[in-house]
Image (spheres, rainbow, N blue to C red):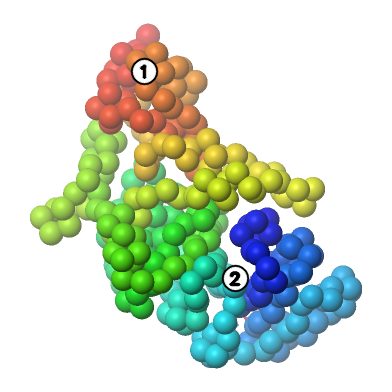
Amino acid sequence: LVARTVATGRPRVLDGLAAAGALGLRIAREGATNVEVVLNDKNPRAAALIRQNIERNAIVNARVVTEDLNGHLATNHYDIVEVDPFGSPVRFLDAALLSAHRGSVLAVTATDTAVLTGAKPEAAWRRYLARVRHTDAYAEVGVRILVGYIARIAARFDKAVQPLIAYAAEHFVKVHLRISEGAGRTDTVLRQLGWFRFDPLTGAYHPADEASDPGVIGPLWSGPLAEEGVLTALRPTAHTGYGAARILDGLRREASFPPFYAENNEMARRAQVSPPRLARVLEALEVRGFRATPTYFQENAFKTDAPWADVLEVYRSMEG
Ligand SMILES: C[S@@+](CC[C@H](N)C(=O)[O-])C[C@H]1O[C@@H](n2cnc3c(N)ncnc32)[C@H](O)[C@@H]1O
């Protein structure tokens, strides 16, 4: 869906870690009709499987390469590169960013969600050079940590990344980033990285100063997780699953809200009240003049533009 929306002209797409080719072949079939897809996997058995799948589905705009992805990217350039590894994408990102050019799109999947969302702080520091702790909004933190990390390592090459669409699903985080070049653009992106301190007593996220605060999370991307134009252009098709349509719907609804969300049971516990129905909380916030919406990130959780102190106050006022 995204490939069809962001690609123009005669786009060249690389499914860099293709396995049986599920992702790349979907792009070849459902993407723009003129798209050219290269499916790469260093495992010759995977490559053989992809060839069979190409034949079986009579796909004419796809071909197979059997190389190490980093080596392949050293001499080849694409308009869209998909990096979908087992676990962390970190080891492929330098090559993908160096190979990227102005206007190209880098799509990265990470399945090491425990690390990105705060369950393994030491691993997050080692792998993503980030401080991550468990918070109510852990799924969103995971997405923002990954975007923040890619933004920083891209900056070393004077390349700037802008999320076209970045989201979390059950077992993975996925980010589609538009690449641009130049020191000015890169500096602008870096200014949108931030540190936050999560207060477990109130559920609040406060902007923090990295150096002075030992309990911080970051650096993480604090800007929008999707580009308005992409959200408008993305239209579910007959091939779009329920999960993808739900995420898309959520991203549209939540686009204008600030970062992070609150979890209903946790907020009720903090306010020492029994958990109300989520709809009641949203209504109470709206009556006070704030905006609020359930978040697709998590069941029974919501985003709001109310200050965190007001959110807790709303809960305290709801007993009985
Ligand atoms: C998680 S799977 C990819 C899943 C696939 N994108 C899909 O949608 O089904 C990762 C694949 O990367 C391949 N791989 C691992 N390291 C690689 C490397 N350095 N270069 C190329 N392929 C590699 C593995 O053989 C494996 O098939």
Q: Give the residue at x 36% y 17%.
A: 289
Q: Is residue 274 visible?
A: no
Q: Is mark 1 within 8 Å of ligand 1?
A: no
Please give left or right for residue 217 compared with residue 109 in the image: left
Q: Give the residue at x 67% y 89%.
A: 66
Image quadrant where one finds the N terminus:
bottom right
Residue 146 quadrant: bottom left
- Reading the chain from its start, which is encountered first: label 2 or label 1? 2
Looking at the picture, does residue 70 appear above or below residue 177?
below
Q: Tag 2: Cα neighbours inside 10 Å, few (<14), some, or many (≥20)?
A: many
> Mark on residue 216?
none
The type of residue carrying mark 2 is: Ile
Task: Give me the C-alpha separation between circle 2 and circle 1.
Answer: 43 Å
Residue 20 position, x and y percent, is: 73, 74
The type of residue carrying mark 1 is: Gly
Looking at the picture, does residue 95 appear above or below residue 295?
below
> Mark on residue 289?
1
Q: Tag 1: Cα neighbours inside 10 Å, few (<14), some, or many (≥20)?
A: few
Residue 81 quadrant: bottom right
Q: Are marks 2 and 1 in contact (CB under 8 Å)?
A: no
- Secondary structure state at the residue bearing disc 2: strand
- Secondary structure state at the residue bearing disc 1: loop
Q: Give the residue at x 77% y 52%.
A: 239
Residue 73 position, x and y percent, is: 54, 85
Residue furthest out toward the top: 320
Q: Is mark 2 within 8 Å of ligand 1?
A: no
Q: Give the residue at x 57% y 82%.
A: 77
Query: Which residue is more in the foreground, 66 or 45?
Result: 66
- Pointer 2: what residue? 80
